[in-house]
Amino acid sequence: MFELEISASSRVGCIRSNNEDMLLVGNTFVRDAALNARVALSECDRYLLALADGMGGHNCGEVASSDVLHNLQFFYNDLPTGLKTVDFNEMVFEWLENMKMIIDAKGRSASRFDNMGTTLVAFAYFNKEFYWMNCGDSRFYHMQKGMLRQLSTDHSLNTLLGSSEHSNVLTNCIGAGCTDCYLDLVSFTDELQAGDVLLLCSDGLTDMLSDEQLQNLLNDGADANTLCLAAEDAGGFDNVSAIVVSVV
């Protein structure tokens, strides 16, 4: 079974005063920090990497991203062992619906939480199967034999209309008034090979660096913090967060 070399970084960027992004690496939460880890998947039946980008322009995005990742960690660790793929999918979708209701209820409980929301992108290992999942415009990339490819689809008005005139307008997220929240959940086991590199990132990275630039940096051995620093050097207009996974 694979081992994963993981680097994670979440930075405030050059413009904003607070960081609304948060990362989950196993059972460790990362915000305004960097982390490195190595995981032998043969020694565990589940492992989770996740990134949540609190909604800029809404209240308490940092609260929404934190609430979602803490709830997701508890849910994931509490899953029964040995679930088949169809049962795993069903339970994840039930979690998403419950999480949406929790965020919405918190928004109604106090005006300071009104209309808060977050994206979510994750890479999951469960019962010897790999999955990636996405809600919003945070991204999941797969690099194989030096070629980087975005697997996730941005749930944004830009994608829907095929234009670049509506940057940062989301059509799907957790909270923030999104009534029909959904999740792309894709089995990934057959595509993963030793030597591959995975990238989970917020739009604070991809708004500053093109896919070609990301590919070149990863081929040069860049870790997550190096990518985030490159985004800051390019302007750092938003919070910037990334998780880089090397499959060994």
Image (tube, helix red, strand yellow):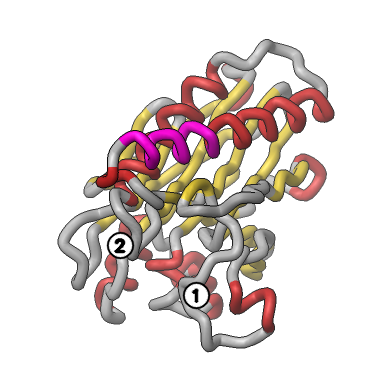
Between circles 1 and 2, the one closer to the viewer is 2
Task: Note whether 126 is above or below 216 in the view shown.
Answer: above
Tell which of 157 and 223 is nearer to you: 157
Residue 239's mark?
Answer: 2
What kind of secondary structure does the magenta stretch mostly adopt? Answer: helix
With 225 as the anchor, is 160 left or right in this view?
right
Q: Identify which residue is drawn at 67% across, 11% down.
A: 80
Q: Secondary structure at mark 1?
A: helix
Whether residue 195 appears in this view of the structure is no
Whether residue 51 appears in this view of the structure is yes
Task: Note whether 89 is above or below 9 in the view shown.
Answer: above
Which mark sits nearer the N-terminus, 1 or 2? 1
Residue 183 position, x and y percent, is: 67, 47
Kind of residue indicated by mark 1: Asn
- Quadrant where the C terminus lies? top right
Residue 66 image-quadrant placement: top left
Q: Identify which residue is drawn at 33% across, 51% down.
A: 61
Q: Identify which residue is drawn at 29% across, 49% down.
A: 60
Kind of residue indicated by mark 2: Asn
Residue 216's mark?
Answer: 1
Residue density around tag 2, few if under 14, some if 14–19, many if 20 or more, within 10 Å: many
Task: Note whether 67 is above or below 238 in the view shown.
Answer: above
For the magenta stretch, what is the residue range? 100-109
Is 101 within the magenta? yes
Q: Secondary structure at mark 2?
A: loop
Is 74 within the magenta? no
